[in-house]
Image: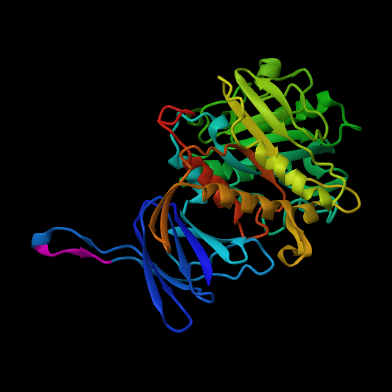
Amino acid sequence: MKQLSIVNHTSEILLVEATGVLGTRETKVLLPSLATTTTIAKHASVFTFSTPAQRGDYEKDWVAVPKVYAVTLPRVLGATWKVVDLPSGCPWTMYRARVSRKHHRLLILPRRELSSFLAKLPDSLPLSSLMLPGTHDTMAFYGWPISQCQSLATPLALQLQSGIRVLDIRLAVIKSRLIAYHGLYPQRASFQEILTTIHIFLTASATCRESIVMSIKQEDFEVTSPSLFSELVHEEIMNGPGGRDMWFLENRIPKLGEVRGKVVMFSRFGGEGAGWEGGLEGLGIHPTAWPDSARSGFTWQCKDTLVRTHDWYNIPSFLSIPEKTALATEILLPPPDDPPFPTLAISFFSASGFPLAFPPTIARGFGYPKLGLGVEGVNGRIGRWLLDMLSGQDESTAISPRFTLSRPADASMRIRGWALMDFFKDPQDNGLVPLLVECNFRGRRKGEEGWL
């Protein structure tokens, strides 16, 4: 026998019918935001999910036709979790995760529109209380295996449509123009091309209420003066698509309503802010310190907000993946001392190191780790951590020895911050981003974090 825990994080009552290898059937009722733990036959993998029929006006004898979806759960051989392939039009997202050899978990979430998920959140939320998925070295599509951090199959436009809201743009000056670079490798995209893609996204009717945070960093500081670089960034922004109106350039953490349809500048350049209106106060969010590859992380102040940052990227080898994952996820939870002022967590899931820790290896891992034939990457481990956190349970109520209901503990669970990833669609096709987006809708209490 194998135990399957099913967690219903939707707002609907779900009926689940499990079919065994001998045709046996078992039906369970999943109440909204309740977890159901039951025992199923070892080889049962076909399930039917439906919503109960709803009656309308009894005088007219009207009955709503229930939604019915047949689902085959994927095997998780060689992995710790997988995204469930669902029928077209299914309003849910499902994940199957391995708890132990004889215990698996199925997490059911509402399907969010990733291209416009911020439109569903209130204007009153400060960006510090959001979970914003991001990409480290957003434009680093070339230079495998040392400099490539994103797949060629995920260009900037697709990243934005996939829910990425924090961009890490690294630039160098080539023939008096700004070009995307990572280290010594040119990335074949101009800053103007990047701005054009963003402007199209932020002015489209379906996504005009979104907001993007853009970190800009100079890659050629050894050959180009910081003042010239800053001057060119200013010039290309002001004269580029959308111009000044597309940007939020104040040095503070804004509320979502202030920056809909805009790019929030996060300047990791600028020196003294010469040439910018207001100097450093007109360079957007401007870190006061950024220690290089600080293992234990660091903090800095942005007006009334304490920014907690994890950017330990230079790890010794792939053997440091577990430690890297633990540090990158811990910072996304509320600080233990619960300070009486806002905090913002910025976490880089990315890392590399020569010769046994190139970015693809760290993000994706290799082999079949659950079989002892490989190493699970950072992305896979963080996905497992998110699934565990989103499936957290308390207040268990035993219905019978084989049937238990429990209420997830997401009322007290807050996963917040800006999380930047390499190869963000791996190890499962865009499996991480929906989990990060879902954190925005969990652990909210009226009157806290700006929640209405």
Q: Residue at x 17, y 58 (%)?
A: 56
Q: Position of residue 356 (x, y in %)?
A: 88, 54
Q: Nearer the viewer, residue 431 or 387?
A: 387
Q: Position of residue 137 (x, y in %)?
A: 74, 44
Q: How many marks?
A: 0
Farthest residue in the front direction? 401
Quarter of the image for residue 243 reads top right
User: Would residue 399 be visible to someone looking at this image?
Assistant: yes
**Magenta segment includes 109:** no
Residue 71 point in image, percent of width and height: 47, 70
Q: Residue placed at 76% from the left, 37% from the top?
A: 311
Camera-side residue of 39 and 449: 39
Give the answer, above or below, for where 69 lies relative to 192.
below
Q: Quadrant of residue 351?
A: top right
Note whether 188 is above or below 296 in the view shown: below
Q: How is the image coloured?
A: rainbow
Q: 436 or 329, which lies in front? A: 329
Residue 79 in the image, given as x and y percentages of width and height: 67, 64
The question of residue 61 being in magenta is answered with: yes
Magenta stretch, residue numbers: 60-65
Name the outermost residue toward the bottom.
22
Q: In the image, 400: left or right of 289?
A: left
Quadrant assignment, res 129: top right
In the picture, measured across the screen, residue 434 lies left or right of residue 9, that is right
User: Is residue 348 among what the camera can see?
Assistant: no
- Residue drawn at x 52%, y 28% is 126
Residue pushed farthest left? 59
